[in-house]
Image (spheres, rainbow, N blue to C red):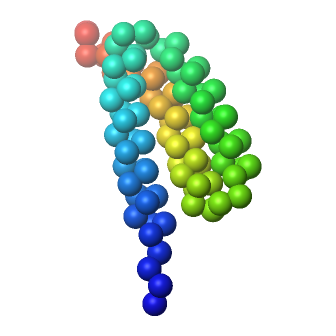
Amino acid sequence: MMLQPAGIVLAIVTFATIGIGHVLVRRLQKRFGVWPAAVFFALGALVLIGSFLVLNDLASAVLGITAITFIWDGIEMFRQQKRMMHERI
């Protein structure tokens, strides 16, 4: 039986990108509003393209997870703004 480290690597990458993204979204939205969402979308698109171009499967998966997390963080910028507006009422 051969151990496959890819699962734990991908789990750590997923956990880290979601955690970092959560903090970034809250801080950036509070300071700058929603305009950083465009940066998240652009970074997500670029990293996603990179994930298609990389030949290594593990690196491609890491880039794919990171790309989707960036795109999701862009969406979360708008949702965070709604939560903040609702909280102020």
Locate residue 48 relative to residue 21 in the image: left or right: right
Q: Is residue 52 above or below residue 1?
A: above
Q: How many marks?
A: 0
Residue 80 in percent (x, y) is at 38, 23
Q: Is residue 10 visible?
A: yes
Q: Is residue 79 visible?
A: no
Residue drawn 54% across and 52% down?
62
| Viewer-side residue, 83 vs 18 | 18
Residue 65 in percent (x, y) is at 53, 48
Q: Is residue 30 above or below residue 8?
A: above
Residue drawn 53% across and 21% down?
37
Q: Is residue 58 above or below residue 3?
A: above
Locate residue 57 relative to residue 80 in the image: left or right: right
Q: Residue furthest toward the right?
A: 53
Query: Which image quadrant is residue 57 in?
Result: bottom right
Q: Residue furthest toward the bottom?
A: 1
| Viewer-side residue, 84 vs 52 | 52
Residue drawn 42% across and 9% down?
32
Residue 60 in percent (x, y) is at 62, 54
Locate residue 42 relative to residue 20 in the image: left or right: right
Residue 18 in percent (x, y) is at 39, 42
Query: Which image quadrant is residue 40 in?
Result: top right
Locate residue 49 relative to residue 71 in the image: left or right: right
Q: Is residue 6 above or below residue 60?
A: below
Residue drawn 59% across and 55% down?
59
Which quadrant, please, contains the C terminus?
top left
